[in-house]
Amino acid sequence: MVEIPDYLLERSREARARFQGTDAEPVEQTAAIVESSASNEETVPVKTEAPEAELEKVEPPKPIAPWVEAAKNRKKIPVWMAPVALFLPIWAFMIWGTLEEPSSHEEGPIAAGGEIYNQCATCHGAGGGGGVGYQLNEGEVVKTFPDVESHIAWVVNGSSAAGTPYGDPMREDSQRISQAQGVMPGFASLDSLQILEVVLYERVTHGLQSPESLEAYVIWAESGDLPVWEAGVYPQLIASSFDEFLESNAEAEEAYEEALEEATG
Ligand code: HEC
């Protein structure tokens, strides 16, 4: 018998098995024969490994059950629906908030004053809580300026020279005193309507006065009949313009008298 080296025999057997897809059975038989012809024993454990791996690959795919197939093909809820569903209650809540009926001072001159107040907010705080400028809210602004006219004059002119007293001389703690000329800038650049609007806004929102008590001034703002207020304007001058207006407008005069009665009880 011609001696063929075992490793060559082994290699050809493996190749054949791989090619035909047969299993390890015949390999073992031949291996036994080869073994009997006095050959190396180390070849025996090597042979079975490759065919075993082959077997796994050949296994046909399991048929998919029809109900599994149906479940896979049915229409699904799109993935983006998850966050949508999550936020729906929040949106509903937000929309609900906007459905409220507007209260009387969410439109008209007082509301318009809220827009202008943005120019004041840098110093007095968005809610009037104060900053560089004094706190205006929680009624503070009305303590300094109990009357609309001196409030208007202040906003037009801004601060006077340091040490100049301003506002109510009987203010609960003590009268205000200007820190320095212009630390509160004058707003003569705004027109009279804008000045009156921001003053009315401050008196309602920060000063906590009722819109009804200011009705006559609201009518004045809406009349289109405001005088021009330039730097240097003073409260008495504004008051005399207002008196003239009341004489010419019965509705405003009535509103003013009603407010006076309310205030004096
Ligand atoms: C650059 C900062 C600044 C801006 C802007 C500003 N203020 Fe003032 N405001 C001040 C300062 C400072 C004072 C105190 C004045 C002083 O001490 O001389 C003051 C005082 C006041 C007061 C009197 C408050 C009190 O109790 O003494 C009112 C009312 C007021 N400001 C209204 C306004 C309005 C209305 C606007 C916008 C149209 C405005 N301010 C914009 C700085 C500012």
Image (cartoon, rainbow, N blue to C red):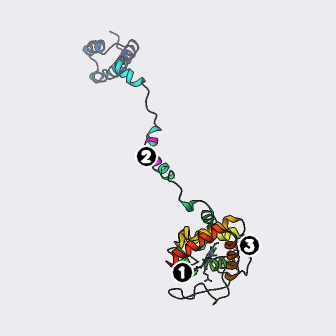
Q: Is mark 1 within 8 Å of ligand 1?
A: yes
Q: Indicate which quadrant contains ligand 1.
A: bottom right
Which residue lies at the image location 60% right of the left edge and 70% below the top edge?
A: 254
Question: SS of the residue at dot 1?
Answer: helix
- How crowded pointer 1 is (Cα within 10 Å; few <14, some 14-19, many 20+) is rated as some
The label on residue 227 is 3
Name the residue beneath numbered marker 2: 89
- How crowded pointer 3 is (Cα within 10 Å; few <14, some 14-19, many 20+) is rated as few
Give, as a three-letter code, the residue at label 3.
Pro
Q: Which is the main secondary structure of the residues drawn in magenta?
A: helix
| Mark-to-mark CA distance, 3 and 2 | 51 Å
| Mark-to-mark CA distance, 2 and 1 | 44 Å
- 254 on left or right of 59: right
Q: Nearer the viewer, residue 175 or 160?
A: 175
Q: Is residue 17 visible?
A: yes
Mark toward the start of the polypeptide (3 vs 2): 2
Name the residue beneath numbered marker 1: 143
Q: Which residues are magenta?
A: 84-92
- How crowded pointer 2 is (Cα within 10 Å; few <14, some 14-19, many 20+) is rated as few
- For the N terminus, the image quarter is top left
Which of pointers 3 and 2 indicates the residue nearer the eye?
3
> In this picture, is 112 found above or below 234?
above
